[in-house]
Image (tube, rainbow, N blue to C red):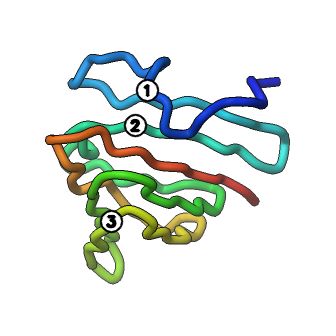
Amino acid sequence: MNKLIGNIFSLEEYKLDRNLEYFQTLFQNENIKIERIISEGQASPKGFWYDQEDYEWVILLDGKARIKFSEPERIIELRPGDFILIKPHEKHRVEWTDPSKKNIWLAIFFK
């Protein structure tokens, strides 16, 4: 089991490599996965689409980002506090994250 106490805004464990996104599983069992993501200018690779088996509820806690959906094609801009529910097999990609700061996300994956 993962550490059950922490601070979602702590950057202590974040590796300061601006080329990589940081993924931290905060909790996981057979039904749910809770993940913290820190990005700093990263986006999905060109032509890549997430096509997930599970629901994903994601909230941007700090920063700015854009998520693009394939059908219908649309872009959702996120600011702190904005959240979205992504359904299974709803193809999407991270189009942009603010390169000037650490963008902190909380993602919850469930069946």
Query: How many labels, in total?
Result: 3
Position in image of residue 87 (x %, y %): 57, 70
* Residue shown at the point (66%, 44%) measured from the top left: 34
In the rendered view, would you say 80 is above or below 71?
A: above
State if disc 2 and disc 1 touch (CB < 8 Å). yes
On screen, residue 93 above or below 20: below
The numbered mark, 1 or 2, whose residue comes first in the sequence reads: 1
Numbered disc 3: secondary structure: loop
Where is residue 50 drawn, in percent x and y?
A: 43, 53
Please rate how many residues cluster around mark 1, counting C-alpha atoms within 10 Å: few if below 14, some from 14 to 19, many from 20.
Answer: few
Label 1 sits on what residue type? Answer: Leu
Q: Quadrant of residue 33?
A: top right
Disc 1 to disc 2, how far (Cα)?
Answer: 9 Å
Residue shown at 33%/45% (left/top)? 103
> Can you tell which mark lies on residue 38?
2
Along the horizontal axis of the image, is 94 left or right of 34? left
> Disc 3 versus disc 1: distance between alpha carbons?
19 Å
Q: Is residue 10 left or right of residue 111?
A: left
User: Circle 1 is placed at which residue position?
Assistant: 11
The reply, left or right, for residue 104 in relation to residue 2 is left
Query: What element does badge 1 sit on?
Result: loop
Horizontal side of 82 relative to 74 (left or right) equals right
Tell me the amino acid under the disc marked 2. Ile
- Residue 94 appears at what percent x and percent y? 31, 54
Tell me which amino acid carries mark 3: Arg
Is there CB contact under 8 Å for labels 2 and 3?
no
Mark 3 or 1, nearer chain start: 1
Q: Quadrant of the C terminus?
A: bottom right
Residue contact at pointers 3 and 1, CB within 8 angstroms: no
The tag on residue 79 is: 3
**Rendering coords of residue 13 (x, y %):** 49, 18
